[in-house]
Image: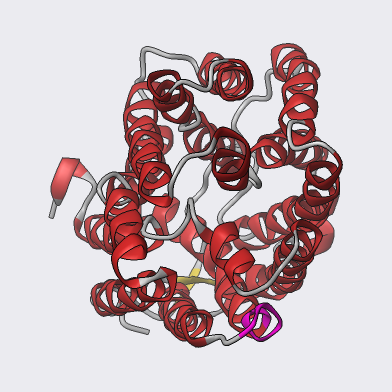
Amino acid sequence: MRGMFGLGRDNTLVWWSLLLWGLGGGLYVYINPLYIKSLGASPTDIGLALSIANAAMMLTYLPAGFLSDRTSRRKNLVVGWVMGVVGTLLVAVAPDWRWLIPGLVISYMSGFVMPALQSYVLAAGRTGDAKRTYTLVMAAYSIGTVPSPLIGGWIGQMWGLRAVYLVATVLYALSTVVMFLIAEQPVPAPSRTGNYRTVLRNRRFMVLCLVFTAILSVFYLGVSFAPNYLEEVVGLKIESIGALGVAAALGSSVLAIVLSSARIPRRLGVLLSQGSILTSFLLLLYAPALPFLALAFFLRGGYSSGGSLLTTWLGETLDPETMGRGFGIYNTIYSVGLTVVPYVAGWLYAGQPALPFLLAAALLVPTMLLILFLPQYQPIPKPHAPVQGGPNA
């Protein structure tokens, strides 16, 4: 079965599940720091809460990578989706920012599914079409976030920010129902080479891990406190911030489709995504009029599209036996950056609100040079791995 966009049945179902998840996540993704602030948190408290949540997520990735290679990826995905529902509900009912942390931790820990999700989508795709398949499937989340930030801002203005998270919980539950419908994939048989030691000795993979982590951490440094900056410095209301979130979601969707084109080499696509983020930060700081801010948030979509391109680049350095473990290591290293960056951003913001964006813009230049001069690694062969059981095992 070809499925939508030629993705196949299972990747089409993952697409719809991610679309619903994006609808839910987009309701609050651009006002999340404002909600934490409304519960009594200072800028450093906000950074601390997000850092704790990211640290919890980081600790899940290595065991998650092992589970992705040795157990049912489908079951891992379903468990992670359910955790996301529970965590968001706890966030919605938290009476204080300290009580919000357990919900944030559970919600972020649901990110342990990333190695399984990345492996599942790549394994379910057609050979030789990894960049297009992965980017299109992951773009579903961005498409889901197109209308939801505006809706989330409106809900927050009418009924309070807590209501935004309750509606998101319902949409997450619907997304989980769709995820239940995907099929099992064969589990690679155990082998002497399919272990973490093999991945750590994969020089190509480890070099790319470190470079890509640096790039995405710089992106995140300039993104973390954008809602607070818009409210406290620019003077925008919550519904206006939600409207800018729509522009960001449109940017993520459009840039993901454009940059995944076979006509654009992956290296150039990553450089274009970095350039869009750099322009976004500069517009945010030096052109705070609403039309320019809308353009800034549209260009901010290079964050997710660039991240997808980097993931497919990494996937070409891994074989089927180590793919889950490889992505587990990558997500762990990346999460170290995500754990440190929010606290650093909060500390910088408390000193001078423009500092996180200025530093991120300055650091983007050397990371672009890293991509420009990174050696061109050839994809490793993808032999058919022996499997245990059938598709329903």
How many marks the image carries: the answer is 0
**238 shown above or below 282:** below
Q: Is residue 59 left or right of residue 8?
A: right
**221 shown above or below 277:** below
In the image, what residue occupies the spot 63% across and 47% down? 318
Does the magenta portion include 200? no
In the image, what residue occupies the spot 47% across and 40% down? 236
In the image, what residue occupies the spot 52% across and 33% down? 309
Q: Quadrant of residue 248?
A: top left
Q: Is residue 60 left or right of residue 286?
A: right
**72 shown above or below 138:** below
Instruction: Kindly give the residue lying farthest to the front in the view shown.
Output: 235
**Residue 334 position in % (x across, y down):** 73, 50
Main secondary structure of the magenta stretch: helix
Q: Is residue 231 visible?
A: yes
Structure colour scheme = secondary structure
Q: Which quadrant, please, contains the N terminus?
A: bottom left
Q: Is residue 191 left or right of residue 273?
A: right
Q: Is residue 189 visible?
A: no
**Residue 370 position in % (x across, y down):** 77, 19
Q: Quadrant of residue 21?
A: bottom left
Looking at the image, which is closer to me, 218 or 201? 218
**20 shown above or below 361:** below
Looking at the image, which is closer to me, 38 or 68? 38
**Residue 194 position in % (x across, y down):** 70, 63
Q: Which residues are magenta?
A: 96-101
Q: Which quadrant, please, contains the C terminus?
A: bottom left
**Residue 257 position in % (x across, y down):** 32, 29
In the image, what residue occupies the spot 71% across and 75% down? 63
